[in-house]
Every structure is written in C-alpha cells, then in structure tokens.
Image: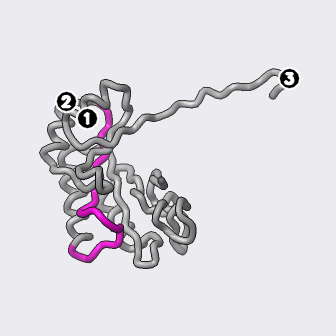
Amino acid sequence: MLDNIPIFRLVTVLIEAAVESLDAALAAAEGGAHRLELCTDLAHGGTTPDVQLLRACRSQLVIPIFVLVRPRAGDFVYTPAEHRTMLEQIHRAKDAGARGIVTGALSATQHIAETLTAELLDAALPLPVTFHRGGSRSSPAAGSLPTTSHGSCTTRGCTRCISV
C-alpha cells in the first residue's frame, strides 16, 4: 500500500493443457490454452507421444507444444536402455518441431539423477526443459522441489518444475 492506496499488480497466468490427441489439442487451443504438453497415457502419468501426433498438432496449431519424454509409466528411475530411448525421443521431438521438452529422471534415493538429467538437458538444447513429476516423488518431503547435491532442479538447468 502506498499512502493507503492499494497497489495492484497485473498477474499473467499461462494456461498449459496436457493433451493426448489432435482433437484435444485443438480444443485446448480454442479454449484458451497458451501452451500444450503433448503426451499419451495420461491416465498413468503420461508417456512420450508418437512423433506423427506432434507433427499433426504442429501443422494445425500456432501455440507452443512441449513434448513429454517418458518411455513408460511408473517411477522415474530409468535403466540405461530407457535413458538411451529418452535421448532418442528428445532428438525426434526436436526434429519434429517441439518448442520444449518435459522430462526428468530420479535416482533410487528419489533425488534428481544428476548425470542422466544433465544428459537429457544437453540433448534438449536449445529448447527449454520442464522437470516432470520429480517434485511429487522426491525426498525428503512429498511436494518439495527435487534436489541434487548442488541445488534444485531449476539451478541444474531446467526452466520449470512440475511439483504436483
């Protein structure tokens, strides 16, 4: 307050919709979404969509499309083969016109898997990366931002973290 006059700030809310189909993407854009997270199998937390779906969405939409890179449902602790698949999925998404990547990897102790995540971030460059779901599953408290020995996911290079 300034001299008993309330000060208001205009806050812009960005609406992002997680979608699994072209029809859902078109409906989300028509409904006011500013950005899409494209994935499949949302009922189980989401997995990487087919590149053909990304291309179809890109051909009909102008809003940014971020692609979920997650090879399977379940936890976020990945095998070396799954990690290689994720790196390939990132390259395919970039080649197909993704405007951002949503991904993440946790260690067996439920902290950010630093080396794997760094490799995912490097593969995604220059696109922004959102750290996916790690916050809701990471130690020590559910709902906390995932951490490394060097800081949170945003200090490790991710531009945003999904923590719900």
Among the two numbered marks 2 and 1 on one chain, the one whose residue lies closer to the N terminus: 1
Residue at 48%, 63% (x, y): give it: 156
Q: Residues within 10 Å of mark 3 (few under 14, many from 20)?
A: few
Q: Magenta segment range? A: 63-81
Residue at 53%, 30% (x, y): give it: 12
Disc sitting over residue 60 in the figure? 2
Residue at 40%, 78% (x, y): give it: 108
Among the two numbered marks 2 and 3 on one chain, the one whose residue lies closer to the N terminus: 3
> At numbered mark 1, what does the secondary structure look like: helix, strand or loop?
helix
Q: CA distance from mark 2 to mark 1?
A: 9 Å
Q: Residue furthest top?
A: 5
Q: Is 93 situated above or below 112?
A: above
Q: Main secondary structure of the magenta part?
A: loop
Indicate the quadrant where residue 8 lies: top right
Location of the N terminus (image quadrant): top right
- Residue labelled with disc 3: 4
Tally of marks = 3
Q: Residues within 10 Å of mark 1 (few under 14, many from 20)?
A: many
> At numbered mark 3, what does the secondary structure look like: helix, strand or loop?
loop
Disc 2 marks a residue whose amino acid type is Gln
Disc 1 marks a residue whose amino acid type is Ala
- Residue labelled with disc 1: 25
Q: Is residue 70 left or right of residue 7?
A: left
> At numbered mark 2, what does the secondary structure look like: helix, strand or loop?
helix
- Please say if the residues under marks 2 and 1 sit with CB atoms less than 8 Å apart: yes
- Please say if the residues under marks 2 and 3 sit with CB atoms less than 8 Å apart: no
Q: Is 100 situated above or below 16?
A: below
